[in-house]
Image (cartoon, helix red, strand yellow):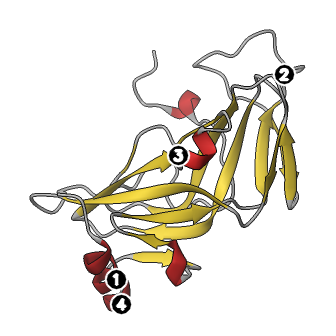
Amino acid sequence: MIVSDRTLKELLRSGELLVEPLEDYQIQPASIDLRLGNNFLKMDENSVESITMDSKIRYNEITREEIVIPPQSFMLAVTREYVKLPDYITAFVEGRSSIGRIGLFIQNAGWVDPGFEGTITLELYNANRLPIRLTSGRRICQIVFALMDKKADFPYSGKYQYQRGAKGSRLHEDMDKN
């Protein structure tokens, strides 16, 4: 079940759910708008011939209040807000419609697991033929929370737990690799 604004406010007041810093205008009827942080990662495209699932990827880190994403380009960014989910709530991040309508696709690679704590790394893709200029502090996406039928037996404790700032792929650390 999707969590309503009323329940979001109750969970935030009680401390069961943490989203900070948070302004009242960010709370929507069924989500919370998240703002763009000032930390970005761009793959170091000149350091390797190709990207593989087994090798650590090198990134160039950029910290600034404004960034331009060139046409047909990919970049990692981070939310300004730090989020802490209890073990009975999951969440997913979606781009805001107004942002999508300018050709910026936003993803966070799936669900935010119950028990996750940290800033949210966003994958940004400019689908336009024109550059897109982004400013830190602007609402960029929304996080939608859903109540689970039971508490998770094993809340999230993975390789991105407690992250702050944009974090690159740690796919090479997966246990299932040969």
Give the amino acid type for the residue marked by disc 1 in the picture: Lys
Q: Which mark is residue 45?
A: 2
The mark nearer the N terminus, 3 or 4, is 4
In the rendered image, residue 117, in percent from the top left (x then y), is placed at 46, 65
Question: Which residue, as the protein is rendered here, is positioned at the far left?
Answer: 149
In the rendered image, residue 89, in percent from the top left (x then y), is placed at 26, 63
* Gap in angstroms between the C-alphas marked 3 and 4: 28 Å
Give the amino acid type for the residue marked by disc 3 in the picture: Ser
Q: Nearer the viewer, mark 3 or mark 4?
A: 3
Q: Which mark is residue 97?
A: 3
Tell me if mark 1 has few (under 14), some (14-19) or many (20+) residues whose alpha carbon lies within 10 angstroms of its own: some
Drawn side of residue 89 relative to residue 82, left or right: left
Q: Which mark is residue 166?
A: none
Residue at 24 percent of width and 55 percent of height: 154
Please name the residue that numbered disc 1 is placed on: 9
Please name the residue that numbered disc 4 is placed on: 13
Q: Quadrant of the C terminus?
A: top left
